[in-house]
Image (tube, rainbow, N blue to C red):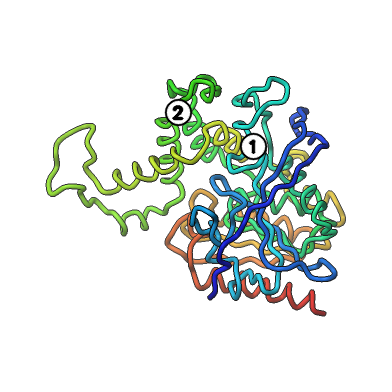
């Protein structure tokens, strides 16, 4: 299948402040985004792709640094989300560190970097910002909103709070809220960052340092939760780094240790510590059922327009961080409301990371879904 080739990010500036769920307000801001394919005459073929924790607007193609988009195996000419049929939009959310206004940018009230003073953002805030950009592109209604993991939460929020602005919601490897265990993992990762001596209360930019030690540990913790135990055993087992044990408490002994340290080192070079804190908090806070007595079915019944949408949920058997049971909770809430929903549970060995990887069955499900959506557009 062909690649999109080189892609160029774009910016959209918003002079109107963005009211946030916390009660704070984000003043004038900008969003970075990329688009792929062509918008058709009646603007009915647009698909928004929502990114997960450490991803960005660079969904597909090759950027100026030669990096392929994080979902390049899914989006492009002839791929499951075919850019010869659809106009695909990737948006970097506010609070991120990949171009959109975030903690590294100047706080207009102080003339210095926002740092820890950047307002707390939620999934709902991101979706509101995305909706403004989609409107700015002149698109009245999206053919679909697609996201995996945290991106899937954003897709669900689109369906719950902006149901008249999309026709299909596709949520992959996601959940209606985080379990206590997931919140715990996020908190340990955050503590690793805020207790790094180089963090300086979130204002490390002024000190010319980066809390890399904390970021490394945070990434190592997170990465463990993205992999399935069997996949880790198959790939690494108890294989040693060297020919024999060194009997050291600090040296790397096992290949899995080497792998995790490598992942942590890479992450600490490109990701922002304040952004990590903001995004994991947004994960923690997402809980659309909380406003409806904890009843997810009532959340989906709140706006009658949600009942007109079509949903697709996809989960993976070895994903223990966003287990299939969590997707089935969403499916049940939709079925209880007689809302159209399809559900695919893919037997894949890769854990949570499966939503980013090549799997013929998984990609087949998404290809079939987008073929149906394309057929609707043509009808």
Name which residue lies at 36% across and 57% down: 230
| Number of residues whose C-alpha sits closer than 10 Å to that of mark 1, classed few (under 14), some (14–19) or many (20 or more) | many
Is residue 298 in view from this perspective?
no
Quarter of the rendering occupied by the C terminus: bottom right
- Give the CA distance from mark 1 to mark 2: 18 Å
Q: Position of residue 289 (x, y in %)?
A: 73, 43
Q: Position of residue 305 (x, y in %)?
A: 86, 57
Circle 1 SS class: loop
Q: Give the left or right position of residue 165, taking residue 93 as reference.
A: right
Name which residue lies at 60% across and 60% down: 7
Task: Give the residue pinned by disc 1.
Answer: 95
Of callouts 1 and 2, which one flags the residue occurring earlier in the amino acid sequence?
1
Task: Give the residue pinned by disc 2.
Answer: 211
Report which quarter residue 37 is drawn in: bottom right
Counting the numbered discs, the total is: 2
Circle 2 SS class: loop
Name which residue lies at 31% across and 55% down: 233
Report which quarter residue 235 is drawn in: bottom left
Q: Give the left or right position of residue 52, taking residue 85 as reference.
A: left
């Amino acid at each position: 299948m062909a690649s999109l080739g080189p892609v160029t990010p774009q910016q959209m500036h918003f002079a109107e402040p963005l009211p946030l769920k916390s009660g704070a307000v984000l003043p004038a801001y900008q969003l970075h985004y990329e688009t792929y394919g062509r918008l058709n005459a009646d603007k009915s073929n647009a698909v928004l792709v929502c990114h997960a924790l450490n991803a960005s607007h660079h969904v597909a193609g090759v950027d100026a640094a030669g990096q392929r988009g994080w979902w390049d195996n899914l989006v492009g000419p002839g791929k499951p989300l075919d850019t010869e049929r659809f106009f695909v939009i990737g948006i970097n959310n506010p609070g991120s560190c990949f171009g959109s206004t975030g903690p590294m940018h100047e706080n207009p009230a102080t003339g210095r970097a926002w740092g820890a003073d950047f307002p707390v953002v939620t999934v709902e805030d991101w979706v509101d910002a995305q909706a403004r950009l989609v409107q700015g592109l002149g698109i009245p209604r999206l053919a679909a909103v697609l996201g995996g993991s945290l991106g899937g939460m954003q897709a669900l929020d689109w369906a719950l709070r902006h149901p008249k602005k999309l026709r299909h919601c596709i949520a992959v490897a996601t959940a209606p809220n985080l379990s206590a265990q997931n919140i715990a993992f996020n908190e340990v990762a955050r503590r690793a960052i805020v207790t790094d001596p180089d963090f300086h209360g979130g204002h490390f930019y002024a000190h010319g340092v980066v809390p890399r030690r904390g970021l490394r540990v945070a990434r190592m913790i997170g990465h463990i939760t993205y992999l399935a135990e069997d996949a880790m055993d198959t790939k690494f087992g108890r294989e040693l780094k060297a020919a024999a044990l060194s009997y050291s408490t600090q040296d790397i002994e096992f290949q899995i240790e080497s792998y995790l340290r490598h992942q942590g080192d890479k992450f600490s070079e490109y990701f922002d510590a304040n952004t990590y804190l903001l995004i994991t908090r947004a994960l923690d806070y997402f809980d659309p059922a909380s406003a409806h007595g904890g009843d997810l079915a009532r959340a989906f019944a709140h706006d009658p327009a949600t009942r007109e949408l079509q949903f697709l949920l996809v989960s993976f058997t070895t994903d223990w961080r966003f287990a299939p049971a969590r997707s089935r909770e969403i499916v049940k809430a939709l079925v209880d409301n007689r809302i159209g929903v399809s559900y695919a549970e893919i037997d894949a060995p890769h854990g949570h990371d499966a939503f980013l990887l090549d799997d013929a069955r998984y990609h087949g499900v998404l290809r079939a879904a987008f073929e149906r959506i394309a057929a609707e557009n043509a009808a």
